[in-house]
Each structure stands twice: as structure tokens, then as C-alpha cells.
Image: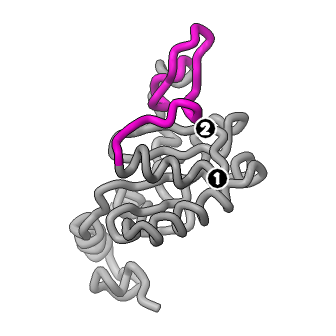
Amino acid sequence: MATDATRAGMSMPLPSVAALGEYRRRLAARPSAAKTVHVCLTTGCRAGGAEGVKAAFERTLAETGLGDTVWVRETGCRGFCARGPVVIIEPEGIFYQMVEPGDVPDIVQRTIVGGEIVSRLSYTDTLGAACVRLADVPFFRGQDRVVLRNCGEIDPTDIDAYIVRDGYAALA
């Protein structure tokens, strides 16, 4: 099975900082998907059934012929464990909470294909306003992630996802 390293034309280990920089450049140049579905798979979301949600996305996207244009990525915690499983649809940044495998066909059809929000999966603030993006949730609105800026953004099981976002840049 080809790894991202072999697909990017590199062999591991990377012998120098310059080789790391070249590898990062090649990773960044890879074609990207039109959309990415980020499914939190840390403890809280996993306990709520996130593995089934991720599998349902992979299956539904394959069945609808969208598997090559929409990527499904496992991510770390978004910081809203009580509302998990949490799903973020990029590039729009649409935030869905308490997602179940049965919700996935609706999300694929209405959001990914149709561009609509599935309002029943959106967070509602104390005033009754829908929070379509995680940054719209009052608790997160004023936050600027620094140390954990990649948490929830990248697949923690994919070292290339970290490298392309300047992981190991401190080595230079």
C-alpha cells in the first residue's frame, strides 16, 4: 500500500531540514478535495458513536459517487465533547452536533450536494439563534486557538497532515 510519503515522491526518513521543507512543499501541492468532512474521533465523540458516523460518511459518499471529491478525515477534539459526535464540513466551516449514522445521508444530500444547513443538527444558543459554524457558538466566539490550533483541523493519525501545516518547522 502506498503511503503519502511514497505518493509525494519521498522516502522516509527525511535526512535534513531541507528535505522536510521539500516534502512539505510536495504535500501542499497535492490536489485537494472540493469538501472535507471532519469527524471528531476522540474519547467523548467516540463514546457517542463517532466511528459509526465516520463509516456512514465513507459508505454514503462512495455510494453517491462523491468519494473522490469529498474527503472524510478523523480529527482531534473541537472542544465541545458534550455535543458529540461533532462534524465540521469544510470549506464552509459548517458545524453539526450530536450526529448519528442515520443523519449522514441527509447531511450528504442537503449540505454537501445541496448547500443547505440541516438545522436540527445545528447548535442553538440560549436566545434560540442557530450557530451554523463552531465560531458562532458564544463559548468559542472570542477564542483564538494558539497552542491547539491544529486540534480538530488535522487527522491526528496522519503525520503528513501535521507536516503540511508546518509540523516540525521548529527543527529549522
Q: In this view, does 102 lie above or below 145?
A: below
Q: Name the residue under label 1.
A: 102
| For discs 2 and 1, the disc positioned in front in the rendered view | 1
The magenta segment is 114-138
Residues packed near mark 2 inside 10 Å, few (<14), some (14 to 19) or many (20 plus): many
Figure disc tally: 2
Residue at left offset 78%, top offset 51%: 47
Q: Position of residue 46 (x, y in %)?
A: 72, 54
SS category of the residue bearing label 2:
loop
Residue at left offset 43%, top offset 51%: 109
Give 39 or 107, whichever is nearer the viewer. Answer: 107
Q: Is residue 77 above or below residue 67?
A: above
Report if residue 20 lies within the magenta region.
no
Give 53 or 139, whichever is nearer the viewer. Answer: 53
Q: How are the colours assigned in the image?
A: one colour
Q: Is residue 121 left or right of residue 150?
A: right
Residue at the extreme right: 47
Q: Is residue 152 above or below residue 118?
A: below
Q: In this view, does 54 lie to the left or right of 49?
A: left
Q: Where is residue 12 in the image (x, y as percent from the top left)?
A: 41, 85
User: Where residue 97 is drawn, which disc sits there?
Assistant: 2
Q: Where is residue 25 in the image (x, y as percent from the top left)?
A: 23, 67
Q: What amino acid type should be assigned to the residue bearing mark 1?
A: Gly
Q: Where is residue 157 in the image (x, y as percent from the top left)?
A: 56, 67
